[in-house]
Amino acid sequence: MKRIRVGIIGQGRSGRNIHRYLFETQEALKARFEVVAVADPIAERCKMEGITQSPDFKEYRDYKEMLKDKSIELIVNSTMSMDHIPVSIEALDAGHNVICEKPLARRVADVDKVIEAAKRNGKFFAVYQQSRFRHLYRKAIEVMNSGILGRIVMVKIAYNCFGRRWDWQTIQDMCAGELLNTGPHPLDQAVMFYGDADPEKIVCTMDSANTFGDAEDHIKLLLMGKGHPTIDFEVSRSCMFPENTYNIYGTNGGLKASGSEVTWKYFLPSEAPEQHLISKPLEGAGRMPIYCGEKLHFYEEKWTAPEYALTMESWGVKYYEDAYEALVNGKQMEVTLDQVRRQVMIIEECHRQNPLPKSK
């Protein structure tokens, strides 16, 4: 099996603790990828105990020096969010394939710039949206798409918690805030639940509620359009009692999912009593007024994710297996750039509707 030579820019929380950890510890990825270089100005972050480094492994304090190594086949861009676009373009122009951390950008115009750079150089470019491979989400959308719940009226997605934050991920000028930090995970899924089209209507309210920075940490978003379910989306750090991650409303039933469990309940139209619209008030015995009432037989099913599927590592492995097939065999990535572009379009519109004041 061919091993792809990888260089990682940035050894912070994502570059070191997500990407490099996956490449160096997961057997499925060790067979497919070889980390031959990392770049970070902090030398201590470039060391990883307990791993056998490639004999070709090199450390760089300056990523620009690493980009000169033409033997590196894939650059993973794990720089800070505001550097994702310029550094990705720089790596593409240097002749490398690139996978960039999320968020890709805050504006569609920047997405178009990096897509154009990939086309101009004839290189592969993708965005690390590993939550597309979250087993809880995949089971929920599988049930939804099966048709058993009938026509889907609404999908609620909530990635909520309670917590204060005071790092750079709370500063607007650093391309931060919860919509750009946590948001790309559920928003990627929201785009899939909605369907393959731009939402006709986007309504969003955002607040800086429980943060020490000037960026948003509370988002309520609605995506609407004819022929599509309404998507009710929440990301908040002010929610003390988070409930279901996904809640799907259908004409024949519904689904809830959180933790490791997906539960769905539905009736079969073929078994339902036949009803006809009546324009007069309903009457019962003795012509007494009554309310609509019928007995529907509901089926209930449950699915529990296997233990291995509960970790973000398992989602990351699936993402990189997909990326490997795209790089080596030309397969279409499951997370497409059109979908990422749609996600950024929604993010940009949310910010347009909610121009938060900036700290001086």
Image: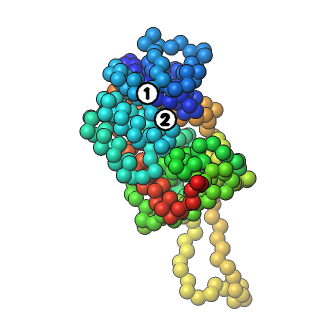
10 Å crowding of disc 1: few (<14), some (14-19), many (20+): many
Q: How is the image coloured?
A: rainbow
Residue at 67% x, 46% y is 165
Residue at 51% x, 38% y is 80
Disc 2 residue type?
Thr
Which residue bears the numbered disc 1?
63
For marks 1 and 2, the one nearer the N-term is 1
Which residue bears the numbered disc 2?
79
- Please say if the residues under marks 1 and 2 sit with CB atoms less than 8 Å apart: yes
Residue 88 left/right relative to 93? right
- Residue 34 rendering spot, x and y as whole percentages: 44, 19
Residue 336 left/right relative to 249? left
Residue at 55% x, 83% y is 278
- Residue 331 rendering spot, x and y as whole percentages: 34, 34
271 vs 292, nearest the viewer: 292
Disc 1 residue type?
Tyr
